[in-house]
Amino acid sequence: MNRREAIQRTVLALGYAISAPALAGVLKGCKAAPELSYKPVFFTEDQARTIAELAEIIIPKTSTPGAKDAGVPGFIDSMLNEVYEKEDQDSFLKGLAAFEEDAKNTYAEFFTDCKPEDQVALFKKHHDEALAAAGSGGPTGWWNTEAGADKPFILKVKELTLLGFFTSEPGATQVLQYNQVPGPYQGCVPLAEVGKAWAT
Amino acid sequence: MNLNIEAEAQNTYDAIVVGTGISGGWAAKELTEKGLKTLVLERGRDVRHVVDYPTMTKDPWQLPHADKLSAEELKFYPVQSRTNWVTQANKHWYVKDTENPYTEVKPFDWIRGYHAGGRSLMWGRQTYRFSEMDFEANLKDGVGVDWPIRYNDLSPWYDYVESYIGVSGRAEGLPQLPDGKFLPPMELNCVEEVFRDKIAEKFNRKITIGRVAHLTAALPHDPSRGICQSRNLCVRGCPYGAYFSSNASTLPAAAKTGNMTLRPYSIVHSIIYDEKKGKAIGVKVLDAETKEEIDFFAKVIFLNASTLGSTFILLNSISGRFPNGLGNGSDQLGRNLMDHQYRAGADAKVDGFEDKYYIGRRPNGIYIPRFRNIGKDKRTDFIRGFGYQGSASRSEWSRGVSEMAFGEELKDSLTSPGAWNIGITGFGECLPNPENRVSINKEKKDVYGLPTLNIDATWGENERAMRTDMKESAAEMLEAAGFKNVTMFDNPDNMGLGIHEMGTARMGRDARTSVLNKWNQVHEAPNVFVTDGAAMTSSGCQNPSLTYMALTARAADRAASELKKGNL
């Protein structure tokens, strides 16, 4: 049973007095769930929902917290609003619109209306294409500045998701490990003794 | 008239130190410990050790925007942000470029911190001695002028400074990079050890752990400072006082004597020269808060306002005797601006060692001492040489962006550290060139109505030829060590970005060709000492702060003894 069917059944079962246009809206999905856990400043609510679902596809909740648990959707909204320059904001929104357009052309609905497996398939299609086009980057370090090329939209979302997630307390401390005061540096330790990767 | 005399008496000290950064802190400590009543003038605000480090214990999630500046904030830092190092956690240490203009006749990144402690709070902490070879280089090559001192003149002062500030490192017995008074070295990681051994075997070159002004053992004379905890958040100010800064070390020492008066918000814009007495008698201060003009007087003046800050003050000190700036009879003041070039080198992937990792964020890396143009190694395309800095590490979560995985698979894979990488960048010597210069711009004023600097400097042919070798030799060593996907890099590198700007009031033997004598005294105004980077006659390829500190301690000793003898 997908979300659309679920809503329909719930509506029928509870016998809500609901107007036809409103019901159409609910069924279309654009004003209903998935719920947003924050009030977007930069995105419209529709855009914010798409970003939140994409973030959760990239880092889902498992036995440990996922992107939504870690507040990643709100983080991305504030990064777009406050850190991105105007032209980068525009380019991001253009990418988002094109992504939504593809959802519509492929599945005839908003991205957030698509079935979960269709959402994942659409993400994967864009993600695979973007990585194929990007080629392989060399190793980088503090001595090597970031390449300035404009990343495809889907990789911007992935990058923002990973950044927001692994700098969050749940991401850094429950998925990876974090120690604010490590003590004197130990340069060569069996991985088995250290355990998980360091958040920083 | 009586009022004036009274005011003058009130504003009179034995010594004035202009600036509180890495060399000013040392001048303050040494002069006050020798019993001189010393006025220490800082153009920015006071920064008290620990108390005024607002971000020092913040976790990543406690900083907005994952530590990145907002687009609005970035507008204040168009130059400072060229480093890519200005973040939410440290933005308060960098000047707002919008309030501190200068003119880039050619692109020049002037990276500054206007507050007590200056850039000693944000410095890279790499700490190396210059060698006999460096002090002899200009004479041998016929470049610039000869240093008026040799290694033996400075060696005891290197000892003295290192012992006081605490320098971690390993003795290697290299003539081009003299050993110092070291605290225990930090560890190399597994891959760096392999690199060290391969390079020794195949090139007979040394790789050593970086020598850093961090405590790896207690300092008996300074129990207030603690041992480095490998947080690698140094630039925010260290709650343990584990790395050397003026704030953690020299300024508290000076305060303890009871002889220091530290006056923040005091912009020194010129030195007062008394034509009748034929000597400098004090400094003119603009109070940054009240905008009041105040004169302060002293028998001896130490300029430690940073290379270009001190040079500005001298250039802006106009009198009948010195129409082109105090002590500028040689016309060398403002000339010979140098820096170190870097961001050219190579990196590589490293196979294996998947079962090895590390604990701690080591605030340090590896160092490859200079090997070019030493002994039998002779290049025909450039003189002097470069050292390398770099490190090996395992890639972390950010690698996930370019991985095919997503979802649970990605999340799982990122919980383990990624493959090992290694990279090194050269730090190359820059030759003194009189055409690389700064001058006063009277048309463009800062927010206080003071004139500003024009900076007109660029890398020369020797630096460009060296840069090619910096890349190629890096790749050659990484290849020889057996690492994979060796890739050379050469990133944009304006002059200034090394933040080792130096040389604009050089020391020399002859007043006709240099600004300072062998004791860092202005040839033509011997009670004015300049002991920051402006004094440098050549640049070496080593990080220069230790040399500034040693020159300062030596000059302060000279100043105190000359004062006692009545010679100043």
Image: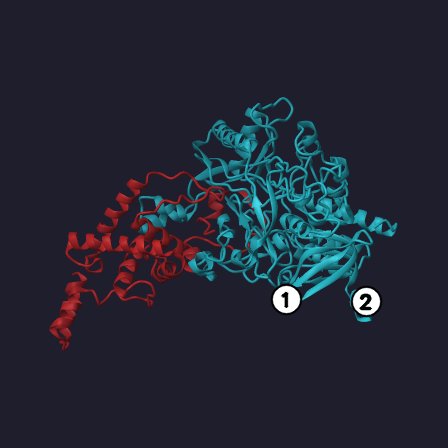
**How many dots with numbers?**
2
Q: Nearer the viewer, residue B221 or B543?
A: B543
| Percent x, y of residue B453 | 59, 50
* Residue at the limit of the structure toward the top, as seen here: B376
| Percent x, y of residue B82 | 49, 48
Placement of the N terminus of chain B among the 4 image quadrants:
bottom right
Whole-angstrom CA distance, mark 2 to mark 1, is 22 Å
Who's the residue at 68% across and 31% down the image?
Answer: B137
First in sequence, mark 2 or 1: give its number.
2
B56 vs B170, left or right, is left
* Residue type (three-letter) at the residue carrying disc 1: Lys
Judging by the rendered image, the residue that carries numbered circle 1 is B291
* Residue at the limit of the structure toward the front, as seen here: B320
Chain drawn cyan in the picture:
B
* Residue type (three-letter) at the residue carrying disc 2: Ile
Who's the residue at 19% across and 64% down the image?
Answer: A29
| Percent x, y of residue A183 | 58, 51
* Residue at the limit of the structure toward the right, as seen here: B565
Can the viewer see residue B175?
Answer: no
Chain for numbered disc 1: B
Chain drawn red in the picture:
A
Judging by the rendered image, the residue that carries numbered circle 2 is B5
Q: Nearer the viewer, residue B10 or B474?
A: B10
B281 vs B119, left or right, is right
User: Are the residues tagged 2 and 1 within 8 Å (C-beta)?
Assistant: no
Quadrant in which residue A5 is drawn: bottom left
